[in-house]
Amino acid sequence: MSLSLAFIEAIAEERIRAAQQNGEFDNLPGRGRPLELDDDAHVPPELRMAWRVLKNAGCLPPELEAEREIQNALELLRAMTDEAERYRQMQRLNLMVTKLNETRRRPVFLEAEQFYYDKIVARVPVRKPPA
């Protein structure tokens, strides 16, 4: 954390503590009740019931499920030591990203992982066919 962020955070924490001690949070609406964190305002009214049923069943939209699979594939790739397996996993990962990109208006953002991909590609030996 940068020094300026730490300083701002310290000031914010101090002001929150002072407000708590002065009782400024004592009469807030909803005090003593659990927070309602299920905000489905972004879901059209006619789809809210279906959305809630699917959410309660643990189902994800297909694109989120695909993103989860991509993250799992990245984790597997990080743990692999065999170069041949790493290469196959990279091919699998590329296919998954391509399929997901075909279903979206915006591409999957994997640039954060790109540095790792480049390191792996650099380590995979290129075998020249016998002459």
Image (cartoon, rainbow, N blue to C red):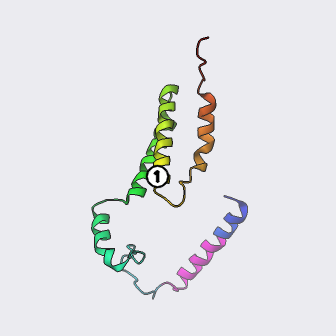
Q: Residue at x 56, y 54 (%)?
A: 109
Q: Residues within 10 Å of mark 1 (few under 14, many from 20)?
A: some
Report whether 111 appears left or right of 94. Answer: right
Whether residue 82 is visible here, answered yes or no, is no
Residue 115 versus residue 109: which sits nearer the camera?
109
Q: Quadrant of the N terminus?
A: bottom right
Residue type at mark 1: give it.
Leu
As displayed, is residue 86 above or below residue 2? above
Quarter-wise, where is residue 130 in the image? Answer: top right
Residue 4 versus residue 68: which sits nearer the camera?
68
Q: Residue 127, percent across and down?
A: 59, 20
Whether residue 59 is visible here, answered yes or no, is yes
Residue 97 versus residue 24: which sits nearer the camera?
97
Q: Residue at x 31, y 59 (%)?
A: 58
Q: Label the magenta part by its dominant secondary structure.
A: helix
Q: Report which residue position mark 1 lands on.
A: 100
Magenta segment: 10-25
Indicate whether residue 21 is drawn in magenta. Answer: yes
Q: Residue 42, percent across and down?
A: 43, 75
As displayed, is residue 3 above or below residue 90? below
